[in-house]
Amino acid sequence: MKLIAITSCSTGIAHTYMAAEALEIAAKDIGWNIKVETQGSVGAKNVLTQEDIEAADAVVIAASTSVNKDRFHGKRLYEVDVNDAIKNGQQVLKDSLQAPIYGGAKQTETIKVEKESNNNFKGIYAHLMTGVSYMIPFVVAGGIMTALSFAFGGINSEGAIAEAFKTIGGTAMGLMWAALGGYVAFSISDRPGLVPGMVAGMLASSSGSGFLGALLGGFIAGYSVLGVKKAFVKLPEKFEGLMPVLIIPVLSCIITGFLMVFVVGKPLTWLNETLTSWLTSMSGASSVVLGVILGAMMAIDLAGPIGKAAYFFGVASLTALTQGQTSPVMAAVMLSGMVPPLAMALSSTVLAKKKYTRDERESGKTAWILGLSFISEGAIPFAVADPIRVLASVTVGSAITGALSMIFNCGLAVPHGGFFVLLIPGATSNVFMMILALAVGTVVSALLVSLWKKEK
């Protein structure tokens, strides 16, 4: 059998390539051929050619974001979450041979529609992931530029270089709302959704409704485009050229804009301001409890839906602050997310080597880098082999790290970057205490799993 696949995750970093590797290994074990296109944060690699597509018996799309499927008309197309490919590669490949033909007969189209209607949450989640994946680089770049402005010019960013960094950072951070709204809408309605989605994001920025406003605005924009397309489906042929350049952008912007201004803008602005005030005033026991909860969420499914929810909360807290401030919530989230791979690396390469296979020890060496880079997925190979012991152990350590981060009043100005961001002046608050919180949680988890695991 000849198969082709596309893998893509929300950040375009770890899951994308882990899923590709899992599918390649699964195909090799079965004795099939497969070519996998990875759509990561640096763009598509190993791109499928028309010849690859024509020769394929089936197509697998393993993604937590929306992937354009237009080039696969007439092929058996099987869609799964990126985690399914990592955990059950062989079954995914086998199931793909029974998948309906994409864009084929009415019967297969009906099957596809029914399948999608029974999985609406997955569709919404994919749209959300698409928007966030495009937004995160703006936040990271903006946050680091702002931190560099402090490094070169002090807290007031004095001097030409510091002022330039501050301007660049502020511009990047300002564009994140347009990216979020635009690409949520793009995921729903393809390219026509970009204009109203970006307009919705900028309206969210100007109104103060922030992350929540841009997110909801993206959904409104995407579905308004679909509504306009449906309303004008019987447009005379000579006017069809007006659809993409006039009718869709104008009407969808009017619908989206009016709803943002007159319906959802003020309530979401109030909600965003309330959230910001709560986070700013949070201290004592309440902050520690929040740190425990967020820390546990970051580890319990290793960057799955639960971990993503905690991460989104951290990003929302960061974007709600004024330029130059650091978020204690974002710090707790990132530090906690670094614990699982670092703990498994410490256990498998230092504390309890004999309790791991040779492949696991090799994975442990890689997990050091992944953990320092804030890629929680580095612990997945260990969790797949021993889920109860590994997940329970790393969840305890991550919860401790989250709590300590809050107790130490640590803060972070960017949503990613791991240990390497800690070295940038202005990107963090109480950096030495951040390192201590990370070290304590890592050691606790590593000791727990090392003592609990059985000899191989």
Image (cartoon, grey):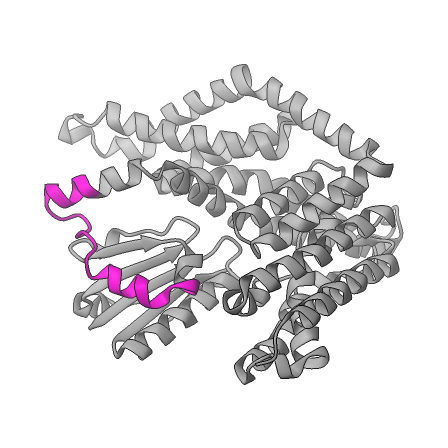
Instruction: Depth check: give the residue in front, 56 or 359.
Output: 359
Instruction: Give left or right: position of 177 versus 117.
Output: right
**Taking the image as drawn, is residue 165 in sight?**
no
Quadrant assignment, res 383: bottom right
Q: From what the image shows, is residue 362 above or below residue 228?
A: below
| Residue 46, horizontal then vertical, whole percent | 37, 71
**Residue drawn at 33 percent across, 34 percent down:** 245
The residue under the point 71% across, 66% down is 448
Residue 246 percent location from the top left of the image: 33, 29
Magenta stretch, residue numbers: 86-111
Residue at 60% over, 59% down:
391
Residue 100 within the segment the image draws in magenta: yes
x then y, percent, for residue 162? 81, 53
* In the depicted structure, whether residue 311 falls above or below residue 282: below
Residue visible at 53% across and 34% down in the picture = 215
Q: Is residue 435 a member of the stretch shown in magenta?
A: no
Placement of 369 over or under 88, stated as above or below: below
Judging depth in this view, the residue of 59 and 131 nearest the camera is: 59
Pinpoint residue 290: horizontal percent, then vertical percent.
74, 40
Apparent side of residue 87 relative to residue 351 in the rendered image (left or right): left
Vertically, is 111 above or below 268?
A: below
Magenta region, mostly helix, strand or loop?
A: helix
Screen quadrant of the C terminus: bottom right
Q: Is residue 134 left or right of residue 313?
A: left
| Quarter of the picture holding the N terminus | bottom left
Q: Is residue 385 visible?
A: yes
